[in-house]
Image (cartoon, helix red, strand yellow):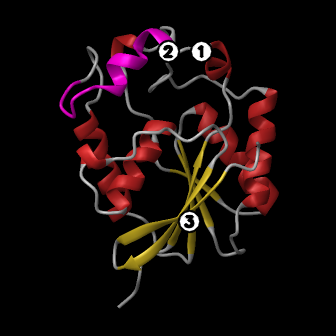
């Protein structure tokens, strides 16, 4: 019986909207800042992966740019995985994040801004991504803050209500080690950019 691969979840580097304090969500065109590119490089250099690893990335620009840096630094192939895209915040995207933070942080799992994706929907999507992962010794998943939290919860067998509250900083690497078929435990968190 095969076990699950080691997972390295990478939150994309700082984006122009992170720097401007804007809520990004599913907005696709937002790219990295110079600091974000440096964070991507630091994350790549901190990743304890071999040459057989594979990089899967959200198709959103800020994640795809981060994944391209990781792939280039580590000489690894990069493939898009639409399931790694960020949680949609619907009509709220582009608004100042500080205006929305309280409502989003205290949101019930079945609530979303108009046109957005609920926490429960995100958690279910994260579970589908994990079940569809290719067989590999090690995978690097380049994604976004809310999606990363949902992936950690789903991988560790936690329900949507038990998901970690804190969103890792840009450029953070969260390592998950397999503890059985399709199950992981949080092993380490690296924030090489600090």
- Region rendered in magenta: 97-111
Q: Is residue 50 visible?
A: yes
Element class at badge 3: strand
Element class at badge 2: helix
Q: Residues within 10 Å of mark 2 (few under 14, many from 20)?
A: some
Element class at badge 1: loop
**x, y percent for residue 51:** 72, 74
Q: Are marks 1 and 2 in contact (CB under 8 Å)?
A: yes
Residue at 47% across, 49% down = 81
Residue at 35% across, 53% down = 153
Look at the image and tell me in which quarter the N terminus lies: bottom left
Residue 59 within the magenta-colored segment of the rendering: no
Q: Upstream in the sequence, badge 1 or badge 2?
A: 1
Q: Is residue 8 left or right of residue 88?
A: right
**x, y percent for residue 74:** 77, 62
Question: In this figure, which residue is indicated by the disc labeled 3?
Answer: 139
Cα separation between marks 1 and 2:
6 Å
Residue at 47% across, 39% down = 166
Q: Is residue 25 left or right of residue 138?
A: left
Question: In this figure, which residue is indicated by the disc labeled 1?
Answer: 21
Residue at 34% across, 79% down = 181
């Amino acid at each position: 019986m095969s076990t699950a691969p080691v997972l390295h979840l990478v939150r994309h580097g700082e984006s122009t909207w992170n720097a401007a304090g804007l809520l990004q969500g599913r907005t696709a065109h937002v790219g990295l800042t110079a600091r974000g590119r440096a964070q991507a490089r630091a994350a790549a250099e901190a990743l304890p992966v071999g040459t057989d690893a594979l990089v899967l990335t959200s198709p959103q620009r800020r994640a795809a740019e981060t994944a391209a840096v990781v792939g280039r630094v580590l000489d690894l192939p990069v493939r898009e995985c639409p399931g790694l895209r960020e949680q949609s915040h619907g009509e709220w995207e582009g608004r100042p994040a500080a205006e929305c933070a309280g409502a989003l942080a205290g949101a019930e799992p079945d609530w979303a801004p108009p046109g957005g994706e609920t926490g429960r929907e995100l958690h279910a999507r994260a579970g589908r991504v994990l079940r569809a992962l290719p067989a590999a010794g090690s995978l690097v998943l380049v994604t976004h803050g809310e999606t990363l939290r949902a992936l950690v919860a789903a991988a560790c067998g936690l329900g949507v209500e038990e998901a970690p509250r804190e969103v890792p900083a840009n450029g953070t690497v969260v390592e998950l080690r397999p503890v059985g078929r399709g199950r992981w435990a949080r092993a380490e968190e690296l924030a090489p950019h600090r």
